[in-house]
Amino acid sequence: MLKLSNSTIKKHLKNLTREELEAEILNMTKIYPIIQEHYFSILFPDSEEVLDKYKKIIEKEFVHKGEILRYQIMKQAIKDFSNVSTNKGQIAELMIFTVECGVDFTLSYGDIDDEKFYRTISSIFEQALKYIVDNQLEEEFVDLCNELTRSSQSIGWGFGDGMMELYSDYLGHMDEDLK
């Protein structure tokens, strides 16, 4: 893949007039929808339109009848949304939503005979918890993470125990009456 240095791009941009620069940006938003999503997220940070698009991508992976879950699609959706959004709460929400889908999927269909499934969902939960703590979003997400951890306790393969351990590592011990 060809790669231009930032200095080369800056040099090019400095040679453009304001109108040419605006035209170039507008053209890029037409060609690359992800750039339009980025600007939409900047201009309307509280809108859930872009978030909902990525939630649907993830949710679709859990409704494939008889097909293997495509973990890379889920991870890419989280990565892409993290790149376009400036709303830290929504980024955390998408990660937690993915874990919710995984827990609900298991509770609906029984234990999944696929260690990769549990490793992936646990990994996303840990990524979400780390992101929540790093961005000081604990107050906003502690109850949801608590409920999600509690819901996972009946899931086998050590998944529920792993969820509890992750919760404790990042958010502290759960209240006894909430276990």
Image: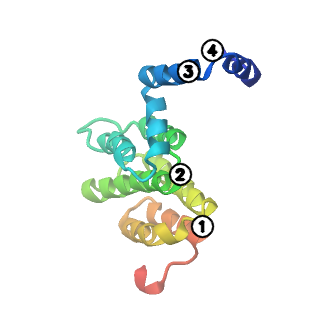
Q: CB atoms at circles 2 and 3 under 8 Å apart?
A: no
Residue drawn at x 63%, y 60% as measured from the top left: 134
**Secondary structure category for the residue under label 3:** helix
Lateral position of residue 78 relative to residue 169, left or right: left
Q: Earlier in the sequence, mark 2 or mark 3?
A: 3
Label 3 crowd bin: few (<14), some (14–19), many (20+), radius 10 Å: few
Label 1: which secondary element: helix
Q: Nearer the viewer, mark 2 or mark 3?
A: 3
Position of residue 14 measured from the top left corner of the image (x, y, whole percent): 70, 21
Residue 121 point in image, percent of width and height: 46, 51
Residue at label 2?
123
CA gap, disc 4 and disc 3: 30 Å
Q: Residue furthest left?
A: 65
**If you read the primary sequence from the N terminus, does the residue marked by circle 2 or circle 4 appear first?**
4
| Amino acid found under the numbered disc labelled 1 | Tyr
Residue denoted by label 3: 19
Residue where numbered disc 1 is placed = 170
Instruction: Point out the image quarter for the C terminus.
Output: bottom left
In the picture as drawn, the residue positioned furthest to the right comes out as: 7
According to the image, label 4 marks what residue?
1
Give how far apart the Cα atoms at labels 1 and 2 are: 13 Å
Other residues around mark 1 within 10 Å, as few (<14) / some (14–19) / many (≥20): some
The residue that appears at 43% across and 40% down in the rendered structure is 74
Amino acid at the residue labelled 3: Glu
Q: Amino acid at mark 4?
A: Met
How many discs mark residues in the rendered view? 4
**Disc number lying in front (1 or 3):** 3
The N terminus lies in which quarter of the figure? top right
Q: In terms of sequence position, does the residue under pointer 4 or pointer 3 come before the other?
A: 4
Mark 1 vs mark 4, CA separation in Å:
39 Å
